[in-house]
Image (spheres, rainbow, N blue to C red):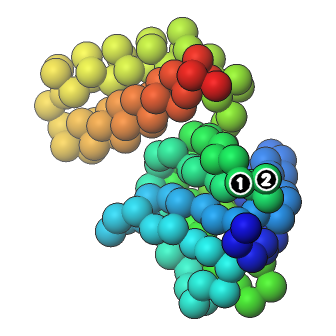
Amino acid sequence: MSKLYPFEVHTPYRLFYSDMIEAVTITLIDGEIGVYADHSFFTAPVCAGILKIKDKKGRWNHAFTTEGFLEVKAHKTVLLVDAAEWPHEIDYGRALEAKKHAQEQIASGTFRFEIGAAQTTLRRAEFRLKVHALKEKA
């Protein structure tokens, strides 16, 4: 078993996760990173995507998170995001509708800012659908 360290995920609305873990993987703006105990310290922006947490029992847990910041410090690692959802918390119908709507906006968008916002919505919806699918496998 690997060395454990404290990890927290905060949103503006709740403390999403707080426990001792073995590892976490998340997507930064320049690629995916894995953080284990005694990792070098840093702060970096994260992209919307799938958060993978290896808990103290060695099991991998998955969640959807939006954009935010990851801070690796000496005494704990903290992820600050706008939203975080476990697979069972994701509204599949809503995510499917958001994906459809975003695709329509991209197809009919004429302004760059409209297309950019729709692409962000589309990415978030696709990741929510992927995380929701993980619920079916568990």
| Left or right position of 121 against 26 | left
| Between 75 and 103, the one nearer to me in the picture | 75
Rendered image quadrant of residue 85? top right
Picture residue at 70% right of the left edge, 72% below the top: 2
Name the element at disc 2.
Answer: loop
Tell me the residue that label 2 is attached to. 57
Quarter of the image containing the C terminus? top right
Tell me the residue that label 1 is attached to. 58
Picture residue at 14% right of the left edge, 31% below the top: 110
Rendered image quadrant of residue 75? bottom right
Q: Residues within 10 Å of mark 1 (few under 14, many from 20)?
A: few
Quarter of the image containing the N terminus? bottom right
Q: Is residue 63 above or below residue 74?
A: above
Q: Are marks 1 and 2 in contact (CB under 8 Å)?
A: yes
Rendered image quadrant of residue 32? bottom left
Camera sees residue 113: yes
Q: Horizontal and vertical percent for residue 50? A: 51, 45
Disc 1 residue type (three-letter): Gly
Q: Is residue 29 above or below residue 14?
A: below
Picture residue at 62% right of the left edge, 41% below the top: 63
Disc 2 residue type (three-letter): Lys
